[in-house]
Amino acid sequence: MIKKVLLTIVLGGSMAAMAACGGDAEEKTNEEAAPQEETAAADEATGEQPEMPEPDLKDIPDVVAEVNGEVIDKKEFESAYTGQFQQMAMQAQMSGQEVDQAQLKEQIAESLVAQELLVQETEKQKIKVTDEQTDDSLKELAEQNGLASSEEFLAALEEQGLSEEEVRKQVQTQVKVDQLVAQETGEIKPTEEELKKVYEQAQAQQKEAGSEELPAFEEVKPQLEEQVKMQKESEAVQGLIAKLRESADVKINL
């Protein structure tokens, strides 16, 4: 569960772009889309839901990848893949499209490699984490999961087979990566011009989609600032990963 948070940093929104997992879903012709629409209409009429697909975990090697001598094993890959597949499958079920599992496997493997590169860089730079920082992160994760305290959060994870020691170790790793990312990005302060550009783009998209107009710029400015900060942070992280990858010894066995 904690590792998924770290994986999200690495993915940097790339999975969102794969919502259909085909990459070219928008290029389908009306003739190709029609049977899917008819099937969806039939399912709706009968009250039946399409069957949820299962993740294809056949032929996953024991060692999925090696990063500078560190192993990403089958268990770690399957955990990350299954969690992401379930999200993608739900989106695909609603759209009537199929998940491209081969493409998704490649994405997850690359993301785990990138994750390992970031973790190794925190060790190389000897980034330290205090108990107080770990406790604060646990409280934050508890709140994000709708729990009243870090104790409840730890108890919930223990029911899933994760010991407190393991959870704290993963949280410490997350905090180290956060510090590494902060070092890379510095303080991000979006300009008024950048925010207005994003606002105008969003307005144009709303108009093209025939949706309601956005609230006034000043009203949504805080959300726009957060969006731009996240985008710049993601770009910085991807740049750091690319730089680390250049000098790394990486082997993917899928």
Image: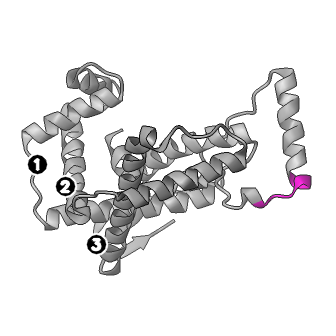
Q: Are marks 1 and 3 in contact (CB under 8 Å)?
A: no
- Residue occupying the point 57% across, 50% down: 202
Image quarter (top left, top right, bottom left or bottom right) of the N terminus = top left
What residue does disc 2 label? 179
* Camera sees residue 13: no
- Which of label 2 and label 3 is nearer to you? 2
Q: Are marks 2 and 1 in contact (CB under 8 Å)?
A: yes
Instruction: Indicate whether residue 31 is drawn in magenta.
Output: yes
What residue does disc 3 label? 68
The numbered mark, 2 or 1, whose residue comes first in the sequence reads: 1
Q: Residue 77: where, in percent of width, then height? A: 43, 52
Q: Is residue 66 placed above or below 192 in the rendered structure?
A: below
Q: Amino acid at mark 3?
A: Asn
Q: Which mark is residue 202?
A: none
Instruction: Indicate whether residue 244 is drawn in magenta.
Output: no
Residue nearest the viewer, comparing 148 with 46: 148
Cα distance, mark 2 to mark 1? 9 Å
Q: Residues within 10 Å of mark 3 (few under 14, many from 20)?
A: some
Q: Is residue 140 left or right of residue 51?
A: left
Q: Main secondary structure of the magenta part?
A: helix
The numbered mark, 2 or 3, whose residue comes first in the sequence reads: 3
Counting the numbered discs, the total is: 3
- Residue occupying the point 37% across, 49% down: 225
Disc 2, SS? helix
* Camera sees residue 77: yes
Query: Where does the magenta region start and end?
Result: 27-32
Q: Residues within 10 Å of mark 2 (few under 14, many from 20)?
A: some
Q: Which mark is residue 129?
A: 1
